[in-house]
Every structure is written in structure tokens, then in C-alpha cells.
Amino acid sequence: GFKGYMTSDSDSCQDIYQNHNFASNGSLATAACLEGGTDINSGNTYTGYLHDAISNHFLQEETARNALRNAYRVRMRLGLFDPHVASPYREIPPSAVGHPAHHELSKMAARKSMVLLKN
């Protein structure tokens, strides 16, 4: 099965209660996102409402723990908790970020994925 984690896009968990009216508040939105499989929220909704969602029984604590396990399992596999010398990712220089060759590779992947979506 899938051994990664799911993450939201630009605090979409906040978006579902502030703009889409899917949930009536942040605690319910947090519960809905986590129960829906969104392990990591790229925003502040989880940090602001997770405790309340669990305290009010909108969300089981075990669901939140599973999301954390998924996130940390990936981080462990990436070596983010290993000593500095043991992780090859720590050797990537800042100049590699945003490199034109990477932009081209991203464009190529986007073009190829559009074909997949069209099919």
C-alpha cells in the first residue's frame, strides 16, 4: 500500500470552512481533513484547532496520531533525523534550488501528466 503522506494545498483545510462552508468552524474542518486522509496541513488550521477537535470529540486522537506516524515515517526514510554526514539530501547546495534544469524537468513532467489526466 501507500507508504507516504497526504498534504493539503495552501491551507485548504481553512478554505473548507472559511470559503466553501463545508465545515462550520476550524475544529470541524480539522476533523474532516484528517478523517479524509490529509496527514499534513500546509497552513495553521491543524495547529489552531486540533486540540479543540479532539476535546470536543469531533476527531479521535488515534486519527491524528496516524497522520503523525505517516509524516514521521517519511521523514525517517528521508534521513531527516540522521546525523548530518549520513544524509545525502543535506549535501544539496542552495544553488540547486530553482535551477533552470529542474524547471525544465518540472515542465516536462507537467506536460506528460496532462496526457495522463486527459486519458
Image (spheres, rainbow, N blue to C red):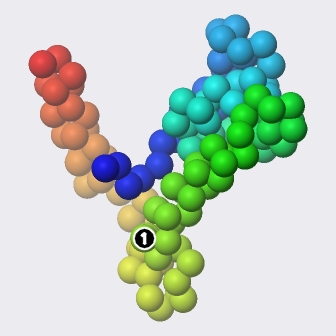
Relative side of 92 to 40, left or right: left
Q: Residue at x 39, y 80 (%)?
A: 88
Disc 1 is placed on an element classified as: helix
> Compared with residue 94, is residue 84 higher up or lower down, i.e. above or below?
below
Q: Give percent across and percent down for residue 19.
A: 69, 11
Q: Give percent across and percent down for residue 111.
A: 19, 31
> Compared with residue 54, is residue 89 higher up or lower down, i.e. above or below?
below
Total labels: the figure holds: 1
Q: Residue at x 78, y 13 (%)?
A: 24
Relative side of 53 to 98, left or right: right
> Compared with residue 87, is residue 41 higher up or lower down, i.e. above or below?
above
Residue receiving disc 1 = 77
Does the image show residue 116? yes
Residue at the farthest top position: 21
Q: Give percent across and percent down for residue 12.
A: 61, 26
Q: Quadrant of residue 25?
A: top right
Q: Give percent across and percent down for residue 38.
A: 55, 37
Q: Residue at x 61, y 55 (%)?
A: 68
Relative side of 32 to 112, left or right: right
Does the image show residue 91? no
Relative side of 104 to 24, left or right: left
The amino acid type of the residue labelled 1 equals: Arg
Question: If the image is split into quadrants, where does the C terminus sit?
Answer: top left
Q: Residue at x 66, y 20 (%)?
A: 15
> Compared with residue 100, is residue 34 higher up or lower down, i.e. above or below?
above
Q: Quadrant of residue 9?
A: top right
Instruction: Decide: few, some or many residues near mark 1? Use Cα within 10 Å; few <14, some 14-19, many ≥20.
Output: few
